[in-house]
Amino acid sequence: MTERPLRLLGDPLLRTPSDPVTRFDEVLSRLVTDLLETVQVPGRAGLAANQIGSSLAVFAYNVDGQLGYLINPRVTAVDGRQEGLEACLSIPGVSASRERPATVTVTGTGLDQRPVTITGTGELARCLQHEADHLRGELYIDRLGREERRSVMRQLWPAR
């Protein structure tokens, strides 16, 4: 099993929009394998390629027994609203309440270049949206309400 090290808040790759995948080759296959193996570490729900040092638009998810990945994912539909705690592997030790769609549909491709569509509700919907945001260079803390964001920032950088 290959567990890749995680990039943390402050790493510029986390704030850089991912590059579309154009080459479906062994390098991409290894990246997908590494993402799937790294996301299976207990306590992890999703992982975007930029979190392990790749600029390619790929993410993996592992929620409630559903393990998978998407290449060049696009959120194609959202519905409803849910409020819940959210955290990020690249911002360890911090969580915050965040509103997200209750249902999310994401379309991308697999390694075979065939279209793949996944629709998730609840925690899977939250994960799919969170990872899609990563690929655009966004972190979940970027869209927190004022008080939630202030609380997170105090946790990240307490007064000395």
Image (tube, rainbow, N blue to C red):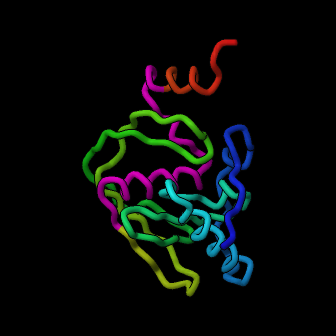
Q: In which quarter of the image is the N terminus?
A: bottom right
Left or right of 31, for residue 121: left
- Residue positioned most to the bottom: 112
Q: Position of residue 83 (x, y in %)?
A: 31, 39
Residue 131 is one of the magenta-drawn residues: yes
Majority SS type along the magenta span: helix
Image quarter of residue 111: bottom right
The residue stretch that appears in magenta:
119-148
In the image shown, does 87 or 73 lie closer to the viewer? 87
115 left or right, relative to 4: left
Up-down: is 51 above or below 117?
Answer: above
| Point 53% across, 34% down: residue | 94
Image location (x, y in percent) of residue 64: 36, 63
Residue 81 in magenta stretch: no
Q: Is residue 101 left or right of residue 7?
A: left
Quadrant in the picture for residue 8:
top right
Quadrant the C terminus occupies = top right
For residue 124, above or below residue 2:
above
Q: Where is residue 106 in the image (x, y as percent from the top left)?
A: 42, 65
Identify whether 69 is placed above or below 113: above
User: Residue at coordinates 39% horizontally, 37% vertically from top-left?
Assistant: 98
